[in-house]
Image (tube, grey):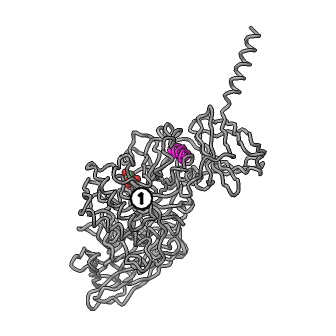
Amino acid sequence: MRKSCLFLSYAASIAALAAEPTLTVDVAHPSGKVSPRLYGLMTEEINHCYDGGLYAELIRNRAFLDDKDRPVHWSVVSGSGADATFALDPVNPYNDKLTTSLCVTVAQASAAHPAGVANNGYWGIPVQPHTRYRATLLARAEPGFSGPVTVSIVSEDGRVVYAQEKLSSLSPQWNRFQTTLKTGRLTPTAKARFRITLDQPGTVWLGLVSLFPPTWNDRTNGLRKDLMQMLVDLKPKFLRFPGGNYLEGETIETRFQWKNIIGPIEERHGHPCPWGYRSTDGMGLLEFLEWCEDMQAEPLLAVYAGYSLRGDYVKAGPDLEPFVQEALEEIEYVVGNTSTTWGARRARDGHPTPFRLNYVEIGNEDGFDKAKSYDGRFAQFCDAIKAKFPRLKMISTVSNDDLRTRKGDMVDLHFYSSTDEFIRMSRDFGANFSRNGPEIFVGEWAAHEDSAVRPWDPPAKKLPPTPSMKAAIGDGVFLAAMERNSDIILMQCYAPLLVNVNPGAWQWRPDLIGYDALSAYGSPSYYAIQMFSRNLGDEILPVQLTDTPVHASATRDSKTGEVFLKLVNPQPNPQHLRLDIKGVASLAPKATVTTLAASPDDTNSIDHPRRVVPVITTLRGLHPSFTYTLPPHSIVVLALKPRR
Ligand code: AHR
């Protein structure tokens, strides 16, 4: 009896030994090159991503075009004897693009009790201490009235004036007025409004009202600084724009018509975006390109390819020719030198130097086109673009197997799946991609907590707009899979990128970065991507995992020799691993460990922006074979320095 017990425990320990969960990395035999463009961003107007988001404009409905019947987001300032009325005035527009104006009539007012109009911004006007705001008005006045007009940033009840200036010399002709509003000491708030008031009776017309806080790189028509910092921190190598569905539009007419979205903002009428609201078109082609420049990322331009969301399409052949021409001119605007028509136009718009462009995507998700017209459309675009810009690579939005006439140099694949599904498919992901091409672009992807809740389901489901740690685990597993295959998956980008978290502001979840008027936060998925993209070598190292539920990828920096090991533990219990780093004589005794670990339901929010964030620690006493324990539900990056 005693003997058999002994035998059993011996056998068990042999079995335990044999089954020790192990991860082996072969540093001596890289299996391929990591794509230098692997980490990028995808963007479109969705969830108030630009208007009420990254685009720093603070005035909502700045050109009074959001609603043809009412000046929504504007209200009358009156009371205590002050009296004003307002009305949309399509008879007195500023120009043929800003097709209505706001007529403001002040019947009674005084310095103590001014009257006029106020704007409540995109869920508030954010006010920061000691900050300069640039206010711009396109305005005219009735004959005999020249002002002054007071522009101010005030508290919601109008009692606290945070900053104000006076504008004068109004005349019956339209003119541009600009001033700087400077705030002093104050507690940051978004409970504020922008006011335009008179302290005497008079009538003025407003064609456009704009208010900008300081922007990233001080660009005039620029971007919100806190959000840009978060994007730059992801080290993106490319930006896919302008969509997504936003490129296609609900109809052909409401597609992204780039020529309408260049030049001064008063030359842009705006257009309906397919996500249920109107775009000011403040973010136009040049703004996208400068955004890339400011992140040192390459533009990945998607051109409209003759198919829109409601199913309208343009038949390949002569009907499609104007659209092909539109795309050729758009590309010329991006890359043409100043001797070309559209390169010269770009210079006139303020950017003489051409932009660097390597990839052009033809359309978006054309697999949804029931008429199956993409084969012909893709071929026509492809031939015309290649003839004029032979260096450019063409991205198709359907698999090459579904294309007969021409094949894409690269294929854009989209994956929106549950975390469980990502975990299931990620082990072998990429194994059956042919290494002879086409190149793979995972142009949209995101793990969802639960496949039963679809991204566009109403917020009644009570899930917040940004993902939880559970989804971040799915993201981490998928990122590891893409990194292991980054010899053929050359680019990837999570979608959607940005969300204004105010009720009514968003249409899709989950989204990577959340914000309101005043502050922004990264979701756990944001930090997962940041950990991956900031710890990336240029060589893929083969990784072998035995007897462990852990997912992993490894890369090496060929210049420094540093090895980056990414480990993802989807399980609720810690995972012990033996790490065998083959092909190195020894390791530097210290390694940096970055850990993102939390309960699956944990997440970040405006009120708790840093509940789930990476923690950096140091691991000591390392040898090429060592044991490491991953916390439950964690994503870990080990940066190991082999000794040469
Ligand atoms: O990312 C949200 C939407 O998902 C994109 O606009 C579209 O391309 C996809 O269907």
The reply, left or right, for residue 625 in relation to residue 51 is right
Q: Residue 363: image x %, image y %?
A: 35, 57
Q: Which residue is mark 1?
A: 394
Residue drawn where x is 46% and y is 42% of the image: 449
Residue 478 lies within the magenta run? yes
Look at the picture and state if 132 lies above or below 12: below
Residue drawn where x is 51% and y is 75% of the image: 218
Q: Residue 35: image x %, image y %?
A: 55, 55
What secondary structure do most residues of the magenta stretch adopt? Answer: helix
Kind of element beneath mark 1: strand
Task: Return the residue found at the far top.
Answer: 1
Residue placed most toward the observer, 536 or 166: 536
The reply, left or right, for residue 119 in relation to residue 30 is left
Q: Residue 216: image x %, image y %?
A: 52, 71
Q: Ligand 1 near label 1 (Cβ, under 8 Å)? A: no
Residue drawn where x is 37% and y is 84% of the image: 176
Task: Return the residue found at the far left.
Answer: 91
- Range of the magenta residues? 471-482
Residue type highlighted by circle 1: Met
Residue placed most toward the observer, 551 or 95: 551
Q: Residue 78: image x %, image y %?
A: 32, 75
Residue 390 lies within the magenta run? no
Q: Is residue 85 visible?
A: no
| Residue 207 location, quadrant | bottom left
Look at the picture and state if 569 lies above or below 184: above
Viewport quadrant of the N terminus: top right
Q: Is residue 75 visible?
A: yes
